Image: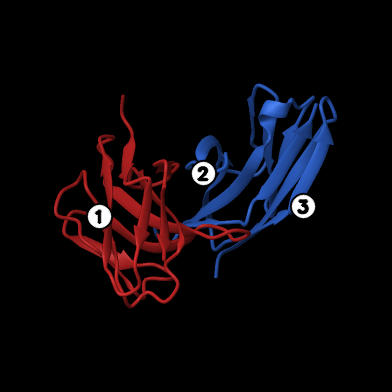
Amino acid sequence: DGGITQSPKYLFRKEGQNVTLSCEQNLNHDAMYWYRQDPGQGLRLIYYSQIVNDFQKGDIAEGYSVSREKKESFPLTVTSAQKNPTAFYLCASSTQGPGELFFGEGSRLTVL
Amino acid sequence: EDQVTQSPEALRLQEGESSSLNCSYTVSGLRGLFWYRQDPGKGPEFLFTLYSAGEEKEKERLKATLTKKESFLHITAPKPEDSATYLCAVQGNYGQNFVFGPGTRLSVLP
């Protein structure tokens, strides 16, 4: 079955450490996205990529980095520069043009 | 700037008590409006896409409608398993980005 796989589902990090969240899709979608979700708030866009080797900052990119070396993969690194990284992170993908987003199951990051 | 608001923030219904959720939006040219269902600790699950005013989509007990300024998600005779957070999002004509509302948390009591 086609879909989006995020890993790990739960992650604990000490302050000052970088962590990388994995996102893989087999839907053959060109566009991929990373969102952050905090309680009581809508999904906020961190980064998105419309094509391999190209990506753009979203609304809250500070303290995060991404790469898009393969069409199927869009990993997100949460760096030590991110001041409040504890959150639920969602990866999504879509076709180019009008069309819905498909989401993974999410990764919950907790900073100890 | 594209914006989406949703109301109410939370809604409690008795099983069988029909109601509607509202999604109001401002966007520079609507490419699509999307409804999602999200269960706690899970990723959002796609429900509907609406593209133009007057369009309606139905799925089981859910019906989504669209006007030029808002969308409604009507829930007919809800069941406890319909309890979830319902998210609304828009995609504008200028760009690939999606803008999400904060969601409506629905609880259906048996």
Residue at (42%, 77%) from the top-left corner? A83
Q: Are marks 1 and 2 in contact (CB under 8 Å)?
A: no
- Tell me if I can see residue A96 in this picture: yes
A103 to A16, vertically: above or below:
above
Dot label at residue A83: none
* Three-letter residue code for mark 2: Gly
Q: CA distance from mark 2 to mark 3?
A: 21 Å
Q: Colour of chain B?
A: blue
Image quadrant containing the C terminus of chain B: top right
Report the front residue among A23 and B109.
B109
Q: Colour of chain A?
A: red
- Quadrant in which residue A81 is drawn: bottom left
Percent position (x, y) of residue A37? Answer: 50, 57
Q: Which residue is mark 2?
A: B41
Q: Disc 3 sits on a residue from what chain?
A: B
Q: Which residue is mark 3?
A: B8
